[in-house]
């Protein structure tokens, strides 16, 4: 007995010594490591890595950029059931322990003693926060000790709710989803607050092993883990038996839900991504920026659909190039093998790869990548005469087998009626861009058939010769020099030994014909090349180049020779559309823009566009108040112009765009281009049933580029069609055929429910009756007289008396009427 008491005393003594030594060791370790521990202050203002998001007008998501999908939530936004589920799974004593669960640590120590293996044990949520934000994941004693000390520090400085919020927004849930908010969308396609108990339990089971317990990759193991979480919640009295049983009976409903894109507009998305990266670098993808663009969702869809259909229509006109591949199949062929081969081909636009199973009479049966069998009726096959070359097709087919046979892999698409038809990926390219002429906002843009097939954005990157779509700028320059819509230019053959050209130049009209003396209005309506050349020579190339800069063209874009009159300048569709806004808004130069505002992760606006606007009433008010557009003074009419009132009024007024051409010039050019639509090369646009549309077609040599630019006072749109390598489009593929239909299809949507806008004639213009042949005043009883509008100072002063008379031509470029003469 004595021996036992003695042994007990010694044991207690040694225990006290060991305890004291342990305490001293822990204290020494803490004082040694404490200065090296990171500051917890960083957690108080943590910025999670949140992807860049792009939104249209109306807040429709266009694109998202960033490797980590995260949607941070505040603690109060996280349902209590979700919190109960995660605590039951990860740390049921979270609200009780001081950051370290001693019971868990003892379990880990016991395993080390019994097995000799280090194990991750006793890791509380606070310790996981310490590790995920500050430490590595390596299993070392030093890291574990740092983790424990840091956890105590975090618990001292943050509330339990703050720690849990950090954890639930940081932790990885698999499939590129970080944070519980993102995981709910990725796995269930809806916000966290809308999930069921079973779904909460499924998500709560993921942090332990996101790959092993992933319900998409391994539904069986995920179900076992979910049921474990439900059992733990029942044991902890967080749910009732009935709730447990109901949730356990629920089937696995998780599936991979990609970020929902409301409006797929990847060319615009890439423009934003590039801009933001150039501005912010890599943090553009992680700082949670939201960029709101000027794109109108309805118009954007219309632009994309119109462009795709236009390019397909070109393909239909030129014939079928044949299947993209062929595999040998028979009635016994394993569909799985065929599908495996088929799935190697991408979907391009709305064209889907398909395997032809058989062709009988005038129908073919095909297999899609999803295993669906479809029928291609003759209506969807008959277009496919064989392509021979750019100008020739083979004999029209009469049977489906003459087009496709079993084993052919082709592309198919559904028409508006849901019927399947044969298609092919267009070799030809195109672009369309639409601007608001009031301030330059880009409301729609598509740079190609499919961004993921070709990322080259032709709307802003393709520099192509403008063709006749450039002529209005030459005509505008001529009007400023004193020419009129009735000025007569001789449309006749000519040979130029131009110093700017290597050889003699013999230009001709598209038709190859000559038309003799022609009024300028008629010349632009019919797009007469020879008239444009003579007109440019008359006003002077240097003057024309200088004048073109008013519309935003750079001098290095413009050739210094007479080919400029035919649009030999290399420009982008954006350049042309931007320049046409000057005509559409009455003479103001606005700058295109596509970013309306940028918000940071907190929702605060860090940038907002302040575009200059084209505002005729503002300009008139400024003039009435004795101010100038140059100083952007836009005092409204009716305001008492005292100093204080004027200053306040001015501060509230928008920034006025610079006027670059006179209202009279803009009116005359617009009226001439309205006639292009009414009875000229763009007459097809009259099918829109409107009288307020103006525009100009453009076609370059050998039909390498086809353009149409058109507008009214509310919208400007430019369409372009051509091959990226400059190959000719083929005979008769002019702007009026290859690009105008694209513009029409788009404008059909853009102008829907919009009233017609009359062209208001500004002061300083007069309309008189003229002789259509000479451009001079018509005789009182002349039956074929027409009306023409002139600047008052340039109107003809005398009547046409004989066949030799012609409209007045400016003398020495100073305007006014001279002796009748033709410009040869």
Image: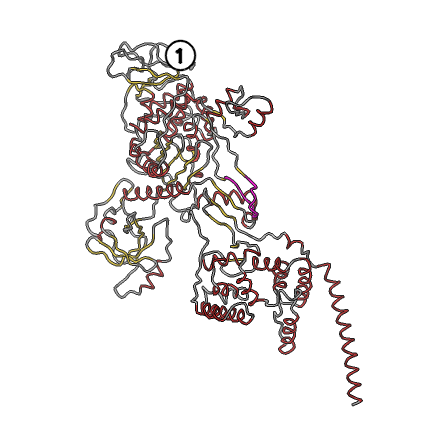
Position of residue 471 measured from the top left corner of the image (x, y, whole percent) = 38, 27
- As for residue 681 lying within the magenta part, the answer is no
Q: Is residue 525 left or right of residue 75?
A: left
Image location of residue 433, percent across then percent down: 41, 37
Q: Secondary structure at mark 1?
A: loop
Few, some or many residues within 10 Å of mark 1 (<14, 14–19, 20+): some
Q: Residue at x 37, y 50 (%)?
A: 348
149 relative to 83 in the view: left or right: right
Front residue of 425 and 322: 425
Q: Residue at x 52, y 25 (%)?
A: 634
Q: Range of the magenta residues?
A: 596-607
One can see residue 668 in this view: yes
Q: Quadrant of residue 162?
A: bottom right
Up/down of 453 relative to 568, above or below: below
Residue 497 appears anywhere in the view: no
Labels in figure, total:
1
Residue 290 shown left or right of residue 702 in the figure: right
**Foreground: 162 or 483?**
162
Magenta span has 598?
yes
Residue 767, quarter of the rendered image: top left
Q: Quadrant of the C terminus?
A: top left
The residue beneath circle 1 is 816
Q: Position of residue 615 (x, y in %)?
A: 47, 27
| Residue situated furthest bottom in the rendering | 1
Residue 262 screen position, x and y as percent: 43, 48
Q: Which corner quadrant holds the N terminus? A: bottom right
Scheme of image coloration? secondary structure
């Amino acid at each position: 007995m004595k021996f036992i008491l003695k042994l007990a005393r010694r044991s207690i003594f040694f225990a006290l010594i060991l305890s004291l030594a342990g305490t001293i060791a822990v204290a020494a370790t803490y004082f040694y490591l404490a200065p090296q521990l990171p500051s917890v202050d960083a957690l108080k203002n943590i910025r999670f890595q949140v992807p860049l998001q792009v939104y249209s007008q109306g807040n429709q998501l266009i694109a998202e950029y960033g490797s980590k999908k995260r949607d941070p939530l505040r603690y109060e936004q996280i349902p209590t059931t979700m919190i109960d589920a995660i605590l039951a799974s990860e740390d049921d004593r979270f609200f009780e322990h001081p950051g370290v669960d001693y019971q868990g640590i003892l379990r880990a120590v016991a395993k080390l003693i019994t097995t000799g293996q280090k194990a991750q044990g006793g890791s509380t949520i606070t310790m996981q926060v310490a590790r995920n934000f500050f430490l590595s994941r390596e299993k070392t004693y030093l890291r574990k000790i740092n983790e424990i000390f840091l956890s105590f520090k975090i618990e001292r400085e943050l509330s339990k709710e703050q720690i849990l919020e950090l954890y639930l927004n940081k932790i990885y849930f698999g499939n590129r989803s970080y944070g519980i908010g993102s995981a709910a969308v990725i796995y269930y396609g809806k916000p966290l607050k809308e999930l069921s108990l079973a779904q909460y339990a499924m998500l709560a089971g993921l942090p332990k092993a996101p790959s092993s317990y992933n319900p998409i990759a391994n539904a069986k193991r995920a179900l076992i883990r979910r049921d474990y979480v439900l059992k733990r919640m029942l044991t902890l009295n967080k749910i009732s038996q009935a709730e447990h049983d109901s949730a356990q009976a629920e089937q696995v409903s998780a599936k991979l839900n990609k970020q929902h894109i409301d409006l797929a507009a990847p060319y615009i998305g890439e423009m934003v991504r590039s801009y933001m990266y150039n501005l912010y670098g890599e943090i553009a993808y992680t700082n949670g920026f939201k960029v709101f663009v000027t794109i109108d969702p309805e118009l954007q869809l219309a632009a994309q659909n119109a462009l795709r259909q236009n390019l397909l229509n070109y393909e239909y006109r030129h014939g079928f190039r044949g299947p993209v591949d062929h595999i040998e199949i028979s009635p016994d062929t394993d569909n799985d093998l065929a599908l495996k081969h088929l799935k190697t081909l991408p979907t391009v636009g709305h064209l889907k790869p398909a395997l032809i199973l058989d062709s009988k009479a005038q129908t073919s049966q095909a297999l899609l990548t999803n295993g669906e069998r479809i029928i291609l009726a003759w209506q969807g096959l008959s277009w496919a005469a064989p392509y021979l070359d750019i100008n020739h097709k083979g004999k029209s087919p009469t049977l489906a087998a003459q087009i496709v046979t079993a084993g052919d892999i082709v592309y198919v698409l559904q028409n508006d009626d849901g019927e399947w038809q044969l298609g092919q990926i267009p070799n030809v390219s195109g672009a369309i861009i639409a601007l608001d002429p009031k301030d330059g906002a880009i409301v729609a843009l598509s740079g190609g058939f499919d961004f993921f097939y070709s990322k080259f954005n032709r709307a802003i990157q393709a520099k192509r010769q403008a063709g006749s779509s450039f002529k209005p700028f030459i005509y505008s320059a001529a009007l400023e020099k004193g020419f009129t819509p009735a000025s007569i230019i001789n449309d006749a053959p000519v040979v130029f030994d131009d110093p700017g050209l290597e050889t003699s130049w013999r230009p001709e009209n598209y038709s190859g014909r000559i038309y003799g003396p022609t009024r300028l209005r008629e010349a632009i309506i019919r797009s007469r090349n020879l008239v444009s050349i003579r007109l440019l020579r008359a006003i002077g190339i240097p003057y024309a180049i200088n004048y073109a800069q008013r519309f935003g063209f750079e001098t290095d874009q413009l050739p210094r020779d007479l080919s400029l009159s035919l649009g030999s300048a290399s420009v982008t569709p954006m350049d042309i559309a931007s320049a046409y806004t000057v005509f559409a808004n009455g003479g103001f130069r606005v700058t295109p823009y596509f970013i309306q505002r940028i918000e940071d992760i907190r929702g605060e606006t860090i940038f907002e566009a302040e575009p200059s606007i084209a505002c005729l009433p503002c300009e008139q008010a400024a003039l009435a108040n004795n101010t100038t557009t140059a100083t952007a003074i836009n005092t409204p009419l009716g305001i008492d112009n005292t100093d204080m009132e004027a200053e306040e009024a001015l501060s509230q007024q928008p920034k006025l765009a610079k006027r670059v051409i006179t209202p009279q010039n803009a009116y005359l050019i617009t009226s001439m281009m309205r006639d292009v639509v009414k009875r000229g090369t763009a007459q097809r646009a009259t099918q829109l049933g409107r009288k307020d549309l103006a525009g100009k077609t453009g076609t370059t040599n050998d039909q390498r580029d086809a353009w149409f630019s058109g507008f009214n006072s509310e919208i400007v749109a430019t369409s372009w069609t051509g091959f990226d390598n400059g190959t000719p489009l083929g005979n008769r593929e002019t702007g009026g055929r290859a690009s105008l239909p694209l513009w029409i299809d788009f404008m059909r949507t853009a102008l829907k429910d919009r009233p017609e806008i009359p062209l208001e004639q500004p002061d300083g213009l007069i309309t008189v009756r003229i002789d259509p042949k000479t451009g001079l005043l018509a005789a009182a009883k002349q039956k074929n007289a027409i009306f023409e509008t002139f600047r008052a100072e340039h109107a003809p002063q005398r009547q046409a008396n004989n066949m030799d008379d012609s409209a007045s031509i400016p003398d020495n470029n100073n305007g006014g009427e001279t002796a009748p003469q033709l410009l040869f």
